[in-house]
Amino acid sequence: MSRSRRESRLSVDVNALDDVQLWLIAVLVFGIGDVVTTSLGLWLPGVTELHPVAASFFQYSVFWGMVVLKSIAFGSCYLLWRWTPQPYCVGVPLGLVVLGVGVTGWNIRVLLLVIGQ
């Protein structure tokens, strides 16, 4: 097999996800995933919110507190994304995806630990 043919088989399309898809994934994992798992967790006995800012918002309403906090986070990140030049701006929604996977995964772990007791 020639080298050029081999390279073409191993090439990866780095533009596989466009901006809209990355933002959609960010909304799914950082937005919806975190809201759902946090809400479920805070209904369980013994589960509390550790972040002091979030905890102060949640004392009034978990759902509306999360809506306000997520709106601020997504609004700020959207502005940062708009101000950051290409190709670096991809890091903004990608960062939200990574953060969303982390916090949603953590919340699922807490849910499983509490349910398993």
Image (cartoon, helix red, strand yellow):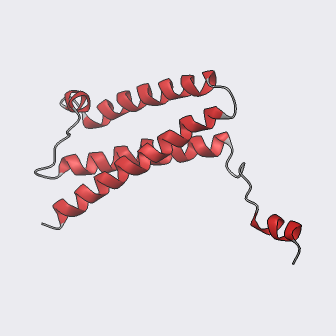
Q: Is residue 46 above or below residue 66?
A: below
Q: Position of residue 100 (x, y in %)?
A: 42, 45
The C terminus, quarter of image: bottom left
Q: Horizontal and vertical percent for residue 8?
A: 83, 65
Q: Residue at x 23, y 50 (%)?
A: 41
Which quadrant would residue 83 be assigned to in this image?
top right
Give whichever of 20, 99 is nearer the camera.
Answer: 99
- Residue 79 in percent (x, y) is at 55, 22
Between 93 and 6, the one lying in front of the other is: 6
| Residue positioned 55% across, 27% down in the render | 78
- The residue depicted at 36 percent of the width and 29 percent of the height is 69
Q: Quadrant of the N terminus?
A: bottom right
Residue occupying image coordinates x 38% and y 49%: 102
Question: Residue extending furthest front?
Answer: 3
Going by the image, does 40 lie left or right of 18?
A: left
- Judged left or right of residue 39, residue 6 is right
Q: Is residue 88 above or below residue 102?
A: above
Q: How many marks?
A: 0
Q: Position of residue 115 (x, y in %)?
A: 18, 63
